[in-house]
Amino acid sequence: MNQYVSRFFVLFAAVMFLAAPVASYGATEGSFSYHNFKKPTRCAVCHRTIYREWKQSMMSRSFTHDWDDVEYFKLALPHAEKFAKVAGVKAGCVACHSPIAFLSGDIPPKPPKAGTRANEGVSCEVCHHITGSTEKEPYNFSFIIKPGNTMNGPRRGVRSPAHKVVYSKFLRSARFCATCHDEKDPYGVWVKETYREWKAGPYAKEGVTCQQCHMYRSEGKAASMGKARKNVAHHIFHGSHFASMLRGAVNLALYPKTERLSKGARLKFKAVLFNGKVGHYIPSGSTEERMLWLEVWAIDSSGHKYAIPVQRKGFRGEKYTIANSHAMAYQAIGEIMGIKNFKGLKRDGDLPNGARIFRKPFFDPKGRMTVCQWYTKNNSLVDYRIGPRQTKIEHYVWRIPRRVKGRVRIVATLYYSQVPSSVGKFLHLSRHDYEPILVNRASFVVHVR
Ligand code: HEC
Ligand code: HEC
Ligand code: HEC
Ligand code: HEC
Ligand code: HEC
């Protein structure tokens, strides 16, 4: 190597060294390595409260949480390895659930029990190094990320002894969240669209961002040696995994026509459900597996219980919104796991027949209902979820059995579940992942003479 060339190389290396931390990239597999991202425990030294909140949130568990672990390693990854059409999800799932593993080219990462850095999930430096998106309306991990010692923050003029801080308008926008919260699958179907739902609804028009509900502000300190401030952003990211967030999220009221009836008469009433608190549809996010449902029971004076089914309205695809213990679905799970003659699992888990289900069913390329969002060919048959500030009215007619008399209590309960219980039990998930969570309850009493 002559002198000119070697000098050029030294210069080139120096330029690259200086340029590397400031060059920006879209999220590309293997464009960085783990050591470009500091561990959240490093930030905890000064940002103790924020660290503790993040640690409790789903963000820190996005790779290790039971159901994420099972869905990726037992279903998506084996499917990607044998079926070319969905091969992209091998890396794609990881790009949102463990961005630093994806950016480091650690694909597939080792399972959570191996204890690698993939377990850090959506870590501090992932979000605070994101500077923008390659898309106008972001989706599918289209974030631009610049590792280094500069943190993007929500305030102007902030100083830290440990790192540089720059103000980022993008960090404060809903588009920032959209980079991971909206997703298109290999069939070109929108399988997650919380941002798009929000954008089309009233909150976007009023300027109420995702951050205002999920990262609310209160007095405190953002860093232990920082200033006391009136409005520090919390990193709690509560969503459907927190019972307190769901409780009362939808208002529920019952309106009976009469409260005095004779034996064998028909009791008519309606249930009115109003979504006045959720900034997007409920359920949202992992819509393929979420259910919100209303079950209505009559309980007579001797304690007998009678399920009261909802009245049909006759819209397209309605059968998927009324619980039916004979309906089977999720056959793709057996197909992926190589189980012969797999008949599928109960579509609606353990719901009582006739309960109204607020959901948006997803269908695989063979037309079967599925919880595998990456293997979804169509989800536009019916969307019977409750939109932001939307009201749904359900009608009930109950022919009172002749043996029932005296005081009868009608109880309507609104529940939510993350995953159908049939799927949860089949895959041995922890009960927390599929148990019904109480959202609301209403009741009234009728007298039967
Ligand atoms: C040695 C202490 C220290 C460490 C370690 C530290 N920070 Fe900071 N950081 C601060 C201080 C102090 C501030 C200014 C806080 C204020 O003025 O309210 C700050 C500010 C910030 C801000 C900007 C806040 C704003 O209002 O714009 C972000 C974002 C941030 N830090 C992220 C991190 C991350 C991520 C890590 C870990 C990789 C980290 N910090 C490590 C002390 C630290
Ligand atoms: C999912 C993305 C995300 C993750 C993960 C995340 N942050 Fe933030 N952080 C934000 C956003 C967005 C804001 C600004 C919120 C706002 O202003 O509405 C913020 C604000 C901050 C602030 C300034 C708070 C204030 O009001 O002055 C600090 C400091 C900070 N983050 C540190 C951290 C640390 C430390 C971690 C890890 C323990 C972390 N962040 C993890 C997105 C994230
Ligand atoms: C780098 C990708 C990424 C970004 C950016 C991001 N998220 Fe998330 N978020 C995730 C992943 C992955 C999960 C799922 C965790 C799990 O596995 O359940 C999640 C979970 C959540 C949850 C919990 C949902 C539940 O069911 O409990 C909320 C709430 C949330 N994010 C809100 C936000 C908000 C608000 C922003 C913007 C300030 C944001 N996220 C930005 C990736 C991201
Ligand atoms: C007006 C307040 C409000 C706004 C604005 C808002 N959310 Fe929510 N979000 C909620 C409430 C309340 C819940 C709990 C009920 C539920 O799970 O649907 C929730 C739930 C969620 C969930 C869990 C959904 C599920 O069913 O698993 C995610 C993810 C989420 N929000 C992300 C976002 C993102 C991303 C934005 C911005 C595009 C946003 N939210 C805007 C109030 C809000
Ligand atoms: C574009 C980003 C993105 C991609 C790609 C992605 N996810 Fe997610 N995933 C999320 C977000 C955000 C949530 C949280 C939504 C919610 O809570 O409703 C989530 C939720 C989940 C959940 C539900 C967790 C729970 O506790 O209920 C599972 C399981 C999951 N993802 C697995 C996968 C698998 C497997 C793949 C690949 C086939 C994948 N994800 C691809 C962003 C993504």
Image (spheres, grey):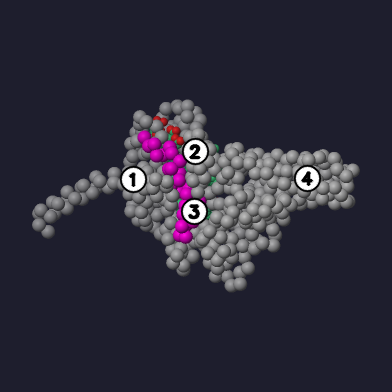
Q: Residue at x 78, y 45 (%)?
A: 268
> Left or right: where does residue 275 sit relative to residue 37?
right
Three-letter code for the amino acid on which mark 3 is drawn: Trp
The residue wearing badge 3 is 190
Q: Is mark 4 within 8 Å of ligand 4?
A: no
Mark 2 is on which residue type?
Ala
443 within the magenta span? no
Disc 1/disc 4 C-alpha distance (Å): 61 Å
Q: Which residue is mark 1?
A: 146
Estimate the x, y position of residue 218 in percent, counting from the top left: 51, 30
- Left or right relative to 134: residue 239: right
Between 93 and 142, which is closer to the camera in this rendering? 142
Q: Quadrant of residue 322?
A: bottom right
Residue underneath mark 2: 204
- Which span of residues is magenta-colored? 167-192
- Can residue 238 be spotted in the picture? no
Mark 1: which secondary structure? Answer: loop
Mark 4: secondary structure: strand
Q: Distance from label 2 to label 1 (Cα)?
A: 28 Å
- Which mark is nearer the camera, 4 or 2? 4
User: What's the residue type where badge 4 is placed?
Assistant: Lys
Residue 38 location, quadrant: top left
Q: Spatial distance from mark 2 to mark 3, Cα to Cα?
A: 20 Å
Quarter of the image with the N terminus in it: bottom left
- Of the two numbered discs 2 and 1 on the same chain, state the one appearing first in sequence: 1
Residue name at image x 21 percent, y 47 percent: 15
Is the Cβ of the residue at disc 1 closer than 8 Å to that at disc 4?
no
Q: Residue at x 33, y 52 (%)?
A: 32
Residue that label 4 marks: 268
